[in-house]
Image: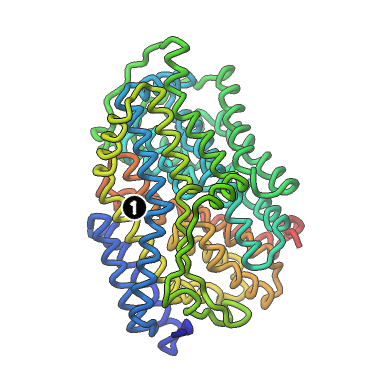
């Protein structure tokens, strides 16, 4: 049975858009205002999505159910698999005391909490975004920050804010490469265009991050270090993206940024050491932070052993992200399971695509090449080198599964919701509402990318979803297609901090389960404000010299 998507089932675009928004509103209101547990809010949103898809948009019941099943499977692998294994690694380092040594060594670089945020949340997190993406950087940095004594809100929310500027080039350039491959853009042109948008925000986000944490005064006290961090990331980001392509943009920029910041801190210190571990305005949360950590100076060998699991993690994640390694592992074991009754049975129609196009629905069980498997191997090797015996490793793994069980369920439900909205066309209806804004389209088209990531949790998925529509709309309005294709990805990065799966990853990594609503309320303004600034930049690039000279034709 074939079914064509319908984007205006009511005959009124306003009413159809309001109906399409109901599932997302249900989930966000449940999380942010009704203080529902995350898995219950996700379940409510999923039920609403199924109801709207079937009763309002006419999607067959069986297809809607299979779309939800495909989403749930995707939520478990690769996303849930990453979360489970990074928490396992973190648990091993906590149990044997090496994480406390790690805390001491980071404090040895700087005891100032603001500078620790720059080093870990922004620069170190960008490396993991570039190497792996898909939730890895938030899981790693949030776990490290909570171990350093930051409050759960600070560790969760600030990791999410920091993980923005690198997202478009995450997982070795996957979002850019996918956008070009699926929708016929030139990959170098799109890489270069994004590289002429995001460096402005690579410079801005470190300032924004510290302002969100310490306020204007606290930010201005360390502006030289923030400037070094941002400039040393933005310049390599621009150069690599424009001259070499999207694959190694984040990895190189992050490595340069970390090296420059550490070197700068050897010759510069802030006048006042910032010791607070809670964001400004949230001093009431001070009691949720870890106990103050008394720094100890450790022998070099002890320090090296403490860093070993995290160095192994970086190496394994980077190797697992290489296309050649992925291809080799997939050649060994990577069965694909077409979802019968859904695969190529849903038809996307103009104006979203140039002509009627069947939507594939294949679940790729890429267990060997999944980033989470690389993290698991890093944890096992690190655990064995740390003198854990195999029985103890298995016991710790079982305890980790029990700890994150509700988080895994939540991720599965949220991905089920996002997949139902995709196959039913609900998200496309929302996108078309943005596409009808005429001369303001550069601004609202950018927000379309933001919405796509907020709904799907992935810049790659948002590019697949709306990349074609951006091209069609740009051509109809006389705008450069590369500008709007890039805007979809650049605007999307700011939606990463409010997508449900990232929030659940952050809450799980910090052990702050059932507080997802508080995290959402904290980051929502930052997400929307930064997305609006990207939209303003894209509008200037569309219409106002000299910004128009930056556009890659």
Q: Nearer the viewer, residue 168 or 545?
A: 168
What residue is shown at x 33% (from left), y 21% (from top)? Answer: 97
Where residue 156 sits in the image (x, y, percent)? 37, 42
The quadrant of the picture occupied by the N terminus is bottom left
Task: Look at the image and tell me whether residue 280 can be seen.
Answer: no
What residue is shown at x 67% (from left), y 78% (from top)? Answer: 476
Q: Does residue 62 sit above or below 32 in this rendering?
A: below
Name, please, the residue furthest toward the front.
332
The quadrant of the picture occupied by the C terminus is bottom right
Q: How many marks?
A: 1
**Within 10 Å of the Cα at label 1, are there few (<14), some (14-19), or many (20+) other Cα atoms?**
some
Q: Does residue 144 sit above or below 170 in this rendering?
A: above
Q: How is the image coloured?
A: rainbow
What residue is shown at x 32% (from left), y 23% (from top)? Answer: 96
Q: Does residue 142 sit above or below 370 in this rendering?
A: above
In the visual, does 398 lie left or right of 80? left
What residue is shown at x 75% (from left), y 46% (from top)? Answer: 243
Where residue 533 sits in the image (x, y, percent)? 55, 55
Where residue 389 sits in the image (x, y, percent)? 32, 26
In terms of secondary structure, where does tag 1 sit?
A: helix
Q: Nearer the viewer, residue 66 or 239?
A: 66
Q: Nearer the viewer, residue 124 or 360?
A: 360
Q: Nearer the viewer, residue 461 or 34?
A: 461
Task: Look at the image and tell me whether residue 334 can be seen.
Answer: yes
The residue labelled by disc 1 is 521
């Amino acid at each position: 049975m074939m079914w064509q998507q319908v984007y205006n089932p009511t005959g009124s675009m306003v009413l159809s858009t309001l109906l399409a928004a109901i599932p997302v509103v249900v989930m966000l209101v449940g999380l942010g205002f009704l203080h529902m547990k995350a898995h219950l809010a996700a379940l409510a949103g999923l039920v609403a999505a199924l109801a709207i898809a079937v009763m309002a948009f006419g999607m067959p019941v069986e297809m809607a159910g299979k779309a939800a099943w495909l989403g749930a499977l995707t939520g478990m692998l690769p996303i849930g698999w990453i979360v489970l294994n990074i928490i396992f690694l973190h648990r091993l380092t906590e149990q044997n005391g090496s994480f406390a040594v790690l805390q001491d060594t980071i404090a040895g670089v700087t005891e100032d909490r603001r500078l620790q945020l720059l080093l870990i949340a922004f620069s170190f997190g960008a490396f993991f975004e570039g190497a792996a993406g898909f939730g890895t950087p938030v899981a790693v940095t949030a776990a490290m920050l909570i171990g350093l004594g930051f409050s759960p809100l600070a560790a969760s929310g600030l990791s999410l804010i920091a993980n923005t500027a690198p997202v478009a080039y995450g997982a070795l350039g996957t979002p850019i490469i996918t956008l070009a491959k699926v929708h016929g853009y030139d990959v170098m042109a799109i890489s270069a265009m994004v590289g002429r948008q995001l460096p402005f925000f690579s410079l801005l986000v470190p300032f924004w991050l510290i302002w969100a944490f310490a306020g204007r005064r606290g930010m201005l006290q360390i502006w030289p270090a923030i400037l070094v961090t941002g400039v040393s990331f933005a310049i390599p980001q621009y150069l690599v993206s424009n001259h070499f392509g999207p694959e190694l943009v984040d990895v190189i920029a992050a490595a340069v940024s970390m090296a420059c910041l550490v070197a700068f801190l050897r010759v510069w210190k802030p006048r006042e050491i910032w010791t607070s571990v809670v964001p400004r305005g949230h001093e009431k949360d001070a009691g949720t932070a870890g106990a103050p950590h008394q720094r100890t100076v450790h022998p070099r060998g002890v320090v090296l052993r403490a860093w070993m699991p995290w160095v192994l993690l970086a190496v394994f994640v980077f190797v697992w992200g290489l296309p050649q390694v992925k291809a080799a592992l997939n050649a060994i074991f990577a069965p694909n399971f077409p979802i019968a009754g859904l695969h190529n049975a849903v038809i996307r129609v103009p104006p979203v695509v140039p002509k009627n196009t069947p939507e594939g629905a294949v679940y790729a069980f890429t267990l060997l090449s999944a980033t989470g498997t690389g993290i698991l191997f890093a944890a096992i090797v690190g655990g064995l080198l740390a003198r854990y015996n195999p029985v103890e490793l298995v016991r710790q793994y079982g305890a980790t599964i029990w700890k994150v069980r509700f988080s895994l369920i939540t991720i599965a439900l949220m991905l089920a919701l996002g997949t139902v909205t995709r196959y039913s066309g609900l998200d496309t209806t929302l996108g078309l509402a943005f596409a009808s804004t005429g001369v303001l389209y550069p601004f609202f088209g950018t927000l379309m990318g933001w919405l796509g990531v907020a709904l799907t949790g992935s810049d790659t998925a948002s590019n697949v979803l709306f990349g074609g529509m951006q091209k069609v709309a740009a051509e109809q309005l006389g705008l450069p297609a590369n500008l709007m294709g890039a805007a979809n990805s650049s605007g999307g990065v700011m939606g990463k901090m409010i997508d449900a799966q990232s929030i659940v990853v952050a809450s799980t990594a910090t052990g702050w389960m059932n507080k997802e609503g508080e995290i959402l309320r904290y980051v929502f303004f930052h997400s929307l404000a930064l997305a609006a600034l990207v939209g303003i930049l894209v509008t200037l690039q569309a219409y106002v010299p000299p910004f128009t000279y930056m556009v890659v034709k």
